[in-house]
Amino acid sequence: MNGTSRPLRIGVLALQGAFLEHSLMVRRLGAEPSEVRRPEQLEAVDGLILPGGESTTMGLVAERWGLVEPLRAWVHSGRPIWGTCAGMILLANRATGQKEGGQPLLGGLDVTVNRNYFGRQVDSFETVLEVPIFDPPQSPGIFIRAPGITQIGPEVEPLAALPGPVYVAVRQGPILATAFHPELTSDTRWHALFLQMVRAAETV
Ligand code: GLN
């Protein structure tokens, strides 16, 4: 626990995309979700989720609202962060398949992400992932215009992959990234894993 008995506060970046579902899941697990739209709101949370949506738009809105530097500082200070789908793209050190003119990335996660690895909107699909750290390891994966991780650095721990091979879930210290949308399923284990990471960071 975090020294006191207060529940963990989990910020969910609420600029655009699927933030509401993350908040519901966080609440279900007994933590307190908090929508983040302004830099100062980052001060009040123990961990941060970057939701799915559209990474170029999310990056541009974050830039306009003065959030890019505060978010970079968050990641680089080693505070716990989890990016799903578009959020995962924002966390990548390197991205391919970007829109013309590129997009602001936060970086921090030593991977190369292909922004639309699994194709366009019509290519959305659902599958069962094998996640060795879970028991049982089967976990549903909902992929919506999903990115894929094509290359990982030595510090990055793969958590799930699909034939390609392409990584779809990885962890690097306090950074978690998933290419799919656990918040749209009834499997709470990804959120539980992230809460565990946040709790671990609180006790160091
Ligand atoms: N491929 C999308 C992007 O570039 C992400 C899709 C999603 O988050 N569902 O942002």
Image (cartoon, grey):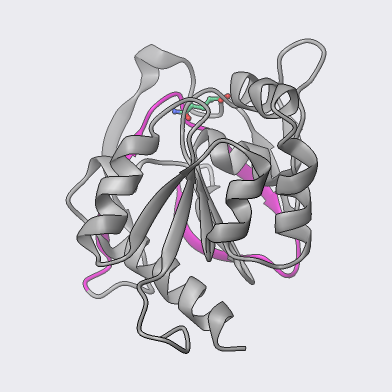
The quadrant of the picture occupied by the N terminus is bottom left
Instruction: Pinpoint residue 179: horizontal percent, then vertical percent.
Output: 48, 42
Question: Looking at the image, which residue sits at the far left?
Answer: 186
The residue nearer to you, when weighing 144 against 2, is 2
Quarter-of-image position of residue 171: bottom right
Residue placed at 32% from the left, 65% from the top?
31
The quadrant of the picture occupied by the C terminus is bottom right
Q: Is residue 1 visible?
A: yes
Q: Is residue 186 magenta?
A: no
Instruction: Pinpoint residue 166: horizontal percent, then vertical percent.
Output: 54, 45
- Count numbered badges in the picture: 0
Q: Is residue 125 left or right of residue 179?
A: left
The residue nearer to you, when weighing 99 against 168, is 99
Q: Is residue 190 left or right of residue 186?
A: right
Q: Is residue 127 left or right of residue 179?
A: left
- 17 up-or-down from 126: above or below: above
Q: Is residue 141 visible?
A: no
Q: Which residues are magenta?
A: 136-162
Instruction: Pinpoint residue 28: horizontal percent, then vertical percent.
Output: 20, 59
Residue placed at 71% from the left, 21% from the top?
98
Residue placed at 26% from the left, 35% from the top?
126
The residue nearer to you, when weighing 109 against 200, is 200
- 158 up-or-down from 203: above or below: above
- 115 up-or-down from 70: above or below: above
Instruction: Pinpoint residue 51: horizontal percent, then vertical percent.
Output: 47, 39
Q: Is residue 151 magenta?
A: yes
Q: Is residue 105 left or right of residue 44?
A: right
Magenta: main secondary structure equals strand
